[in-house]
Amino acid sequence: MRSDDTIAAIITPLGRGGVGVIRISGKESLAVAKQLIAEFPNQIKPRYVYHGWIEGTDEVLYTYMKAPRSYTGEESVEISCHGGVAVIKMILGQCVRAGARQAEKGEFTKRAFLNGRIDLAQAEAVIELINARTEKAAEAAARNLGGHTSAHISGIREKLINMLARIEAAIDFPDDVEGKEQAGLSQEIREQLKIIDKAIAGAGYGRLLKVGAVAVIAGKTNVGKSSLFNLLVGEDRAIVTEIPGTTRDTIEEVIDINGAPIRLVDTAGIRAPKDRAEEIGIARSEEQLERGDIVILMFDGSEERLGEGERRLLEATKDKLAIKVINKIDLGRRLPVKGCEISAKNNIGIGEIREEIYKALCNQNGRDKEQPIIMSARQEGCLNRAKQALQNALESIRMDRGEEIMTIDLKEAVESLGEITGHQISENVIEKIFADFCVGK
């Protein structure tokens, strides 16, 4: 992939629509556009919209973006035409015949990164914004695109670089360093570790917004699982009757809880199966329990004690993230189990269940709203490596291994944080990141 030639691509989804857009980027952008568009002005003003015709193809609007004030940071022309597949492909073909090369996946955004228009965290936010499935995910990605995560990470990195400078000065000029310097460094490192820990905690919330989670409703037959499922979904998706064992198979629906996409799964009631169909349904329920990110354990609050099947269910899910829901409180509360109290029959307590699912999945009680929302697994990995390096630095201080060893640990932390923003990154990692983009972005 060369970065000094002129490229072109369709930057709107390919299909029938009112408008389609082709972007040309590179030093020959104007020259390419002039060959296409009749009566192209000799003196064109940047950031103005012009009207013209591409002979035999379409009537268009086009805009010139002068470097560095364009998406890529290069000379750029964007042509808006009618959104028919044939029309837009014809114009792209004409761009290529006029001297442009068809852009590869993510090449526009890669050029924006290489030209310093955005850093690597902002570049990753572009694809997160495109792929956002809910408004909350889009808001978080837009915040990252605006540089919130980059500024946060750069702040930590700058403090570590300042520490390194002081340590290296102490190595070069040992007579000028006070004895209390190491104790002060330990405190500073711990402060940065706390900030990194909060950012890592934000990665769990970012994953929830980005990919969602699976919430499995489990319990014995006729406890109200399908009723709760229907109330959370907002429509009658699961069959509800007073006959135990009505649900023979898992039923799924994606719901939005505070901006997080949650795949809700209603399962067959746990009991000794009455026939082969129910046996298969229960086996599938057990599989879903293994795969679920959170289990909603439902109990009949009107009963006096747990049954054997319910005790087995509690044992099977003891190591999983779970919330307990006590249903049928309208019949009187007798069961000695703590949990969220609801009446699925009377639609009581359902809002509280939604909030409990959300809080449990993203740890909202402990998340600082000003902390960055890390939505990239790569960035989370970099933060974990930086955390380990700082913990090693603290251990080096405690064991009195010397300043030279400590600087190795601090440099590793600085490098790991630099990989998030792109200050220190290999070409292979860059290629891998932009390979996930679509052509045209």
Image (tube, rainbow, N blue to C red):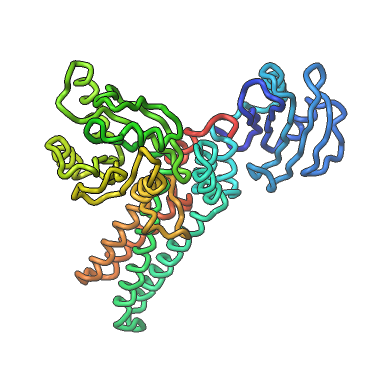
Placement of 54 over or under 292, stated as above or below: above
Looking at this view, is 334 or 199 the one in front? 334
Q: Which quarter of the rendering shows the C terminus?
A: top right
Q: Residue at x 37, y 65 (%)?
A: 192
Count of numbered badges drawn on the protein: 0
- Above or below, comparing residue 403 to residue 5 in the picture: below
Residue 269 position by quadrant:
top left
Residue 46: horizontal and vertical position, in percent? 78, 44
Q: Does residue 102 appear to the left or right of 403 in the view shown? A: right
Q: Position of residue 206 (x, y in %)?
A: 42, 47
The quadrant in which residue 126 appears is: top right
| Residue name at image x 46 percent, y 46 percent | 258
In the displayed structure, 112 sits above or below 408; it is above
| Quarter in which the N terminus is drawn | top right
Residue at the extreme left of the image, as rendered? 308
The quarter of the picture where residue 14 lies is: top right
Residue lying at 60% horizontally and 31% vertically, measured from the top left: 440
Q: Is residue 204 visible?
A: no
Q: Is residue 38 left or right of residue 125?
A: right
Q: Residue 318: x, y in percent? A: 18, 44
